Image: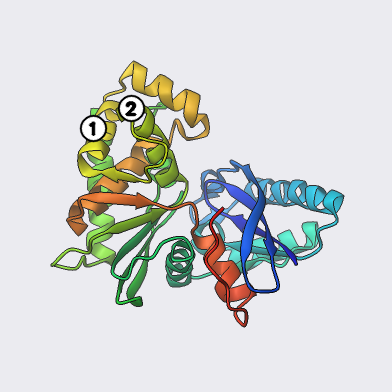
Amino acid sequence: MTQALIDIGSNSMRLTVYDISEDGRFKILFREKIMAGLAGYVSGSILTAEGIECACGGLIAFKETLDALGIGNIAVFATASLRNISNTEAARNAILSETGFAVDVISGEEEAMFGYAGTMQELEVSSGAFMDIGGASTELTVFDGGKILSAASIPIGSLLLYREYVKNIIPGDGSIKRIQKAIADAFEQKYRFPSDGSNPLVCAGGTARAALKLAKRMFDISNECYSITMEQLSGLCRRLSRGDREAMDMVLKLEPDRIHTIVPGLLIMQYVCHEFKTRELIVCKYGVREGYLCQKLLPTMNIRKTVN
């Protein structure tokens, strides 16, 4: 069975196509990404007509690819991109009319739980915390003994912080201080961190994968390593925050689409790591899409962990 899944995020839109075998194993056949930046089309609390057209354009491009390959099993879901706006239903109806796709807008708690479930298809970690930093929200899940203790979505993300506090491409000292305050304020209002810490901290999503890629290059970390120490994260933040030319050139080479959002994203990551009192981040390639696949689309199947 072949299943296509489209994730409409606030920063990027992603298509993933899975091959699912009869015994419940899945593997990723291919991925495509469009950096739509939908959070940038929100005026007040409304996703503008231009933003809706941008989303439709991305979906139509993905549909053309899938049609050419003869893939008909397609599911579409949206996270904060459509959840954190006041015209959600109008946007969903417009997208349905334009593309034929009925978009499932998942809640913040669902996003956090799906993200955790997705990472557990890759890892065997019984206790700790999970984080996914998106363009307009950050999801956190605390788990112990393989059971979820809490799942929350904080309405702050890398693209929203960039739009609100950065005038140029790279934030200056004043912008960084304002971003750090906004992050602290958002979490203090919405989330209470466990007092005893929750090690390890597992992280999924584009910001985490970009951070790992950059840290590997900056600190000569082995390609087989999928974790970042707090010292490495602090060093990465420090060099990028001060606009180090060599470091920024590295971003342009490795993650050019994130040149404007990488610093805000890293500052969220640094804050959460500090509050969780963790010593290292484990970065996963699986996340909310794999969790959605296993728990929403194929809940009756015994999905097995699959290593790609």
Q: Using residue 94 as the reference point, say whether residue 145 is left or right of it.
A: left
Q: On residue 276, which mark appears?
A: none
The residue under the point 35% across, 62% down is 130
The residue under the point 43% across, 39% down is 210
Q: Amino acid at mark 2?
A: Met
Q: Using residue 58 as the reference point, say whether residue 248 is left or right of it.
A: left
Residue topped by disc 1: 235
Pointer 1 and pointer 2: residues touching (CB < 8 Å)?
Answer: yes
Question: Is 12 above or below relative to 117?
Answer: above
Provide the secondary structure element on which disc 1 rests: helix
One can see residue 247 in this view? yes
Q: Position of residue 205 (x, y in %)?
A: 46, 51
Question: Is 259 above or below relative to 116?
Answer: above
Q: Quadrant of residue 200?
A: bottom left
Mark 1 surroundings within 10 Å by alpha-carbon count, few (fewer than 14), some (14 through 19), many (20 or more): some
Q: Amino acid at mark 1?
A: Gly
Check the image and name the residue furthest to the left.
Answer: 196
**How many numbered discs, if any?**
2
Residue topped by disc 2: 218
The residue under the point 50% across, 57% down is 286
Provide the secondary structure element on which disc 2 rests: helix
Mark 2 surroundings within 10 Å by alpha-carbon count, few (fewer than 14), some (14 through 19), many (20 or more): some
Mark 1 or mark 2: which is in front?
2
Q: Position of residue 79 (x, y in %)?
A: 53, 61
The residues tagged by marks 1 and 2 sit, at their Cα atoms, a distance apart of 9 Å
Q: Position of residue 230 (x, y in %)?
A: 22, 43
Q: Using residue 34 as the reference point, say whether residue 192 is left or right of it.
A: left
Question: Is 296 above or below relative to 91?
Answer: below
